[in-house]
Amino acid sequence: MSLYQGKKFLRMHTHLDIMVEERTTDLEQAMGNLRQSQEDLKAAQHQLVQQEKLASLEHLTAGTVHE
């Protein structure tokens, strides 16, 4: 391998390292966003379940009072 080829190889290797680091950073950020979205959805689901339970209880209570 000539000196020129060696320098070219080193530049390409360095460039690829930079690209991998940037992509890794992007993926880590995307993963963090997905985790946050998942937590938000879980919280919304919990809130909806609690609202449904309350609505059912109110319906049962109203039926009992009506009878």
Image (cartoon, grey):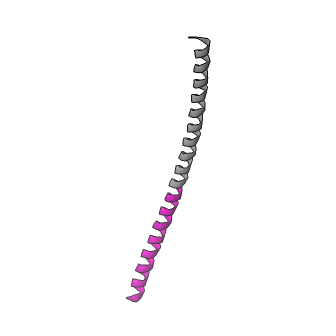
Left/right of residue 1 with respect to residue 48 in the rendered view = right
Residue shown at the point (57%, 42%) measured from the top left = 26
Drawn side of residue 49 relative to residue 15, left or right:
left
Residue drawn at (61%, 24%) of the image: 11
Task: Looking at the picture, tell me which residue is in the foreground, 4 or 25.
Answer: 4
Quadrant where the C terminus is found in the figure: bottom left
Residue at far left of view: 67
Please give the name of the residue rendered at 40% of the width and 84% of the height, measured from the top-left corner.
64
Q: Which SS type dominates the magenta stretch?
A: helix
What is the tally of numbered marks visible in this picture? 0
Q: Is residue 59 above or below residue 53?
A: below
The magenta stretch is 39-67
Q: Position of residue 31 (x, y in %)?
A: 53, 46
As drawn, which residue projects farthest toward the front?
4
Residue at (44% x, 71% y) in the render: 52
Residue 10, position as x, y percentages in the image: 60, 21
The image quarter containing residue 6 is top right
- Which quarter of the rendering shows the N terminus? top right
Location of residue 13 in the rendering, given as x and y in whole percent from the top left corner: 58, 24
* The image quarter in which residue 4 lies: top right
24 up-or-down from 43: above or below: above
Residue 12 image offset from top left, x and y in percent = 58, 25
Q: Is residue 19 magenta?
A: no
Which one is nearer the viewer's eye here, 7 or 40?
7
Front in this rendered view, residue 65 or 7: 7
For this view, does 15 lie left or right of residue 60?
right
Question: Residue placed farthest to the top in the image?
Answer: 1
Q: Would you place residue 18 above or below residue 59 in this image?
A: above
Say if 8 sits above or below 18 in the image.
Answer: above
